[in-house]
């Protein structure tokens, strides 16, 4: 039996479109971050100049969930530094 269009694997262009949509969702959920999908590397990238940070913050993850987790950790770490906690 040959696979039909309903059960075929998504085309790469469809996967890229879904990843760009996920990047847009991450930008909406994490204001102040520039989140992009790099199709050539199959990775999400996020950039932000965080107040109080010594340098710009640049993150990279293979999944949208991984990127969201890294953004949350970066924001928490900066918050702890700002309040003097280690």
Image (spheres, rainbow, N blue to C red):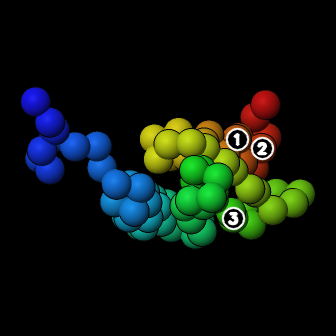
Numbered badge on residue 77: 1
- What is the quadrant of the C terminus in the image? top right
Does dot 2 land on a helix, a strand or a loop? helix
Which residue corresponds to the image point at 77% horizontal and 44% vertical from the top-left? Answer: 81
Residue 70, percent from left and from top: 60, 42
- Labels 1 and 3 touching (C-beta < 8 A): no
Hey, which quadrant is residue 20 in on the image?
bottom left
Marks 1/2: CA distance? Answer: 6 Å
Marks 1/3: CA distance? Answer: 14 Å
Q: Quick one: label 1 or label 3, which is nearer the N terminus?
A: 3
Find disc 2 in the rendering and name its residue: 81
Which residue extends farthest right? 54
Q: Is residue 79 left or right of residue 17?
A: right
Numbered badge on residue 48: 3
- Labels 1 and 2 touching (C-beta < 8 A): yes
Q: Nearer the viewer, residue 75 or 21?
A: 21
Which residue corresponds to the image point at 14% horizontal and 36% vertical from the top-left? Answer: 2
Which residue extends farthest front? 1
Residue 54 visible, this orientation: yes
Q: Nearer the viewer, residue 57 or 9?
A: 9
């Amino acid at each position: 039996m040959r696979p039909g269009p309903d059960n075929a694997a998504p085309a790469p262009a469809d996967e890229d479109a879904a990843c760009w949509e996920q990047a847009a969702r991450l930008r909406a959920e994490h204001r102040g971050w520039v989140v992009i999908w790099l199709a050539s590397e199959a990775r999400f990238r996020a950039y932000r100049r965080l107040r109080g940070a010594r340098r710009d913050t640049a993150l990279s993850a293979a999944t949208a969930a991984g990127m969201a987790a890294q953004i949350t950790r970066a924001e928490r770490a900066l918050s702890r530094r700002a309040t003097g906690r280690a």
